[in-house]
Image: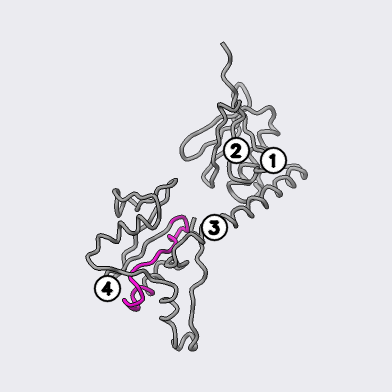
Amino acid sequence: MNDPPVNRPVVHEENSYEGYISTSFDDPYAERINLDENTIVEPVQNEKLQLKLSTASRTWTFEVDTQEQAMLWEATILTVTQNKIPQHLNLLPGQKVMLEEILQGRLAQKIEEDRQKRESLPEYYFDVKRDEAEKMLMESEESGCYLLRPTSDGMHICLSVKQPKCSSVQHFKIIQKGSDYFFDRSHSATINQKSLQDIIDVFLNKYSSVILPYTQVRYASVYVNDSIAENQTMVPPSPRFPF
């Protein structure tokens, strides 16, 4: 009976910074492992030298041949997931140069990813804090009744809503998991949609009256002729994707 295939991590040269590695099984067994900032990697010394890789969903164990190979894999994965070269490892100058190239490629890729995600956000997304969102929505009902903003930790999106003729603003965290969007369970455990706009539409449909989003044009008009702005129209900064 043949021995089972051995897990060995593989990164192809042309995509070493793209945030994933593959196992080196033969093609029918190959598996892509997505890496993120929560990925944990550590060498393990049992009967054989191994590298343990843990993500939110699963843990893998890879065989490596030497301590140096284990350290270099650990350094490579940490560079990709933490966006910096680890300082606690005893790396050689040539290894640091290689990791710097990976890091620069990863940072360039993240800039492009952020640009694409930012362009996909609706015009009523603003890079503002909770209190700023409340001020914007409370200033005038004619300016709109809801907007999107990043959560305080910058990891998710929050829907801030002021109901018509209401003196307060409510905030609802929207979480993305894979291709699904849903509200934080403290608010709702039932709404689950395949797009950001769909989940917002479903949520807003529960209101009896039609409410409009707070758009960038409305935000600018609020400050026209404002003495603080010295009679200049103030426009919010370009949206930044919060993930």
- Secondary structure under tag 1 reads helix
Q: Earlier in the sequence, mark 2 or mark 1?
A: 1
Q: CA distance from mark 2 to mark 1?
A: 11 Å
Residue bearing the label numbered 3: 116
Q: Position of residue 14 (x, y in %)?
A: 68, 43
Residue bearing the label numbered 4: 167
Looking at the picture, the colour scheme in use is: one colour
Q: Nearer the viewer, residue 153 or 160?
A: 160
Amino acid at pointer 2: Ile
Tell me: 204 left or right of 112.
left
Residue bearing the label numbered 2: 21
Residue bearing the label numbered 1: 13
- Foreground: disc 3 or disc 2: 3
Q: Residue at x 37, y 62 (%)?
A: 159
Q: Earlier in the sequence, mark 3 or mark 2?
A: 2
- Secondary structure under tag 4 reads loop
Q: Residue at x 44, y 73 (%)?
A: 216
Amino acid at pointer 4: Ser
Q: Position of residue 27 (x, y in %)?
A: 59, 28
Numbered tag placed on residue 104 in the rendering: none
Amino acid at pointer 3: Gln
- Foreground: disc 2 or disc 4: 2
